[in-house]
Image: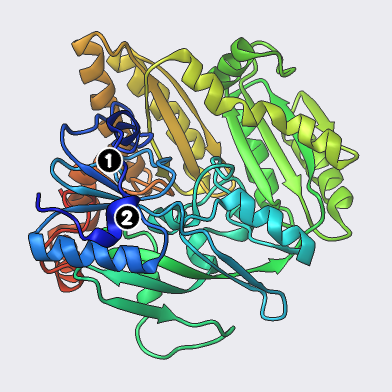
């Protein structure tokens, strides 16, 4: 690859051991290629310089934030450039307009912390909010624990500044509360996984800060009773701010990781929160009554935020607990809420058929669960079984009226199933859109579109 422009000399990571850490994301089994270049951009000008150079020399570019992606969309490409935007982390907060104008490197949780001084909130809340960046959230249209009430990243992005392949800077959307001028190109870029351009600034909608959340934890003997609890909560007049499901195997894994008070042999646990201003306690009491009537064998209600946080600790321990079990394939499918129980059963049937162990937990409020299949990565047969199970779950989600990804994106791992969900004609239209913005095909090639 020809030498990069002099402006970028001190943006390069020259230590190869450090550079290799930028070669992979959090996707299972991701491996860095042998040769790639890492540029840590500090401002829009750096991004323009990289994409101008990349177009001139036909070099593929992978835009990257904190590398928390789980589908391979942020893994380096052989001979390519990794364009890391973590250092573009400026924040401007306008409390009157209730917007934040931020760089892509701003960490989700850090933005939330800054907003407390203004009594404002940015609702999108991925499980990795303590480390994931706004740019990455936009790239995947990230969701999280509170989507049941607040929605996903796309619901809070009013406008973007994007650098296209070749270095052209474009702006989409608006700062105002309303605006319908032209096509919604902001919506096109949110969730595009770096295949169209690189976000260098975002205008985010904020909301008044809700009350500190209070929590209900309900234990059920069976999966069927757990699903009855979900249905009972869907009938509540005031929507919970969080509704999480732990299936039986997930509970077992969490308790093996540490004692979080879950009873052995439980068929399922629901964790429910309300943050409704001046009414959180009223809501959680109503949720507890509904869950008890649905068949919960034990219901705990938090009386204050500290206790609420304690009740949620077991859910927060889920990902570390699953990581501690060893290699796993993690899925991200979404089905109609009424079919959640069918999805959980299907996951465990697939695991049994493939000779694997599995868990199936996640965001019950919006039908988005994260099945996991555990395998021995030193055994080729187990690796093949896990890959096969991955595809089986996609097929199961489709059969239940669902989609292959709810919040993690397509990346590399799910690209083979894209046409199966969208159809050949729709994929062709989307490829044409990509070609319009990226005619040379240098923006994250091979991701999303196989």
Image quadrant assignment for residue 5 = bottom left
Residue 154 percent coordinates (x, y) = 48, 64
Residue at the (54%, 46%) spot, across then down = 126
Residue at the (35%, 41%) spot, across then down = 397
Specify few, some or many for label 2: CA neighbours under 10 Å numbering under 14, 14-19, or 20 or more.
Answer: many
**Left or right, 314 with reference to 350:** right
Q: Nearer the viewer, residue 441 or 289?
A: 441
Q: Number of numbered discs present?
A: 2
**Color theme of the render:** rainbow
Residue tagged 2: 193
Residue at the (72%, 19%) spot, across then down = 260
Local SS, label 1: loop
| Residue 202 in view, yes or no | yes
Residue 256 percent coordinates (x, y) = 60, 10
| Residue 295 in view, yes or no | no
Residue tagged 1: 75
Local SS, label 2: loop
Residue 225 percent coordinates (x, y) = 64, 29
Residue 157, above or below 251: below
Q: Nearer the viewer, residue 125 or 252?
A: 125
User: Which one is in front in this view, the residue at disc 1 or the one at disc 2?
Assistant: 1
Q: CA distance from mark 1 to mark 2?
A: 12 Å
Specify few, some or many for label 1: CA neighbours under 10 Å numbering under 14, 14-19, or 20 or more.
Answer: many
């Amino acid at each position: 690859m020809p030498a990069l422009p002099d402006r970028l000399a001190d943006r390069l990571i020259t230590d190869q051991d450090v550079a290799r850490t930028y070669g992979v994301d959090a996707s299972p089994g991701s491996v860095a290629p042998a040769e790639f270049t890492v540029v840590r951009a500090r401002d829009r000008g750096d991004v323009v310089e990289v994409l101008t150079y990349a177009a001139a020399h036909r070099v593929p570019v992978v835009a990257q934030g904190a590398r928390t992606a789980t589908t391979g969309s942020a893994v380096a490409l052989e001979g390519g450039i990794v364009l890391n935007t973590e250092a573009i982390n400026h924040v401007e907060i306008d409390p009157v307009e209730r917007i934040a104008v931020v760089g892509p490197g701003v960490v989700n949780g850090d933005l939330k912390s800054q907003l407390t001084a203004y009594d404002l909130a940015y609702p999108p809340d991925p499980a990795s909010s303590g480390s994931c960046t706004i740019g990455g959230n936009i790239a995947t249209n990230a969701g999280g624990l509170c989507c049941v009430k607040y929605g996903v990243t796309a619901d809070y992005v009013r406008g973007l500044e994007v650098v296209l392949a070749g270095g052209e800077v474009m702006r989409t959307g608006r700062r105002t509360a309303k605006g319908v001028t032209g096509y919604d190109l902001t919506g096109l870029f949110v969730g595009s996984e770096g295949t169209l351009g690189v976000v260098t600034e975002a205008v985010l909608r904020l909301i008044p800060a809700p009350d500190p959340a209070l929590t209900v934890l309900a234990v059920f003997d069976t999966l069927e009773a757990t699903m009855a609890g979900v249905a009972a909560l869907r009938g509540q007049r005031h929507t919970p701010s969080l509704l999480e499901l732990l299936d039986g195997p997930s509970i077992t894994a969490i308790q093996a990781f540490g004692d979080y008070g879950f009873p052995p042999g439980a068929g399922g646990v629901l964790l429910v929160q309300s943050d409704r201003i001046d009414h959180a306690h009223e809501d959680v009491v109503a949720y507890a009554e509904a869950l008890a009537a649905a068949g919960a064998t034990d219901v705990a209600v938090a009386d204050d935020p500290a206790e609420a946080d304690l009740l949620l600790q077991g859910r927060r321990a889920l990902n570390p607990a699953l990581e501690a079990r060893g290699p796993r394939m993690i899925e991200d499918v979404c089905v109609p809420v009424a079919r959640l129980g069918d999805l959980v059963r299907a996951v465990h049937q697939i695991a049994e058929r493939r000779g694997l162990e599995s868990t199936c937990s996640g965001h019950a409020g919006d039908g988005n669960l994260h099945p996991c299949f555990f395998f021995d990565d030193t055994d080729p047969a187990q690796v093949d079984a896990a890959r096969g199970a991955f595809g089986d779950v996609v097929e199961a989600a489709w059969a239940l009226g669902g989609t292959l990804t709810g919040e993690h994106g397509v990346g590399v791992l799910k690209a083979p199933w894209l046409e199966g969900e969208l159809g050949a004609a729709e994929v062709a239209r989307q490829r044409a859109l990509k070609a319009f913005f990226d005619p040379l095909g240098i923006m994250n090639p091979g991701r999303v579109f196989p």
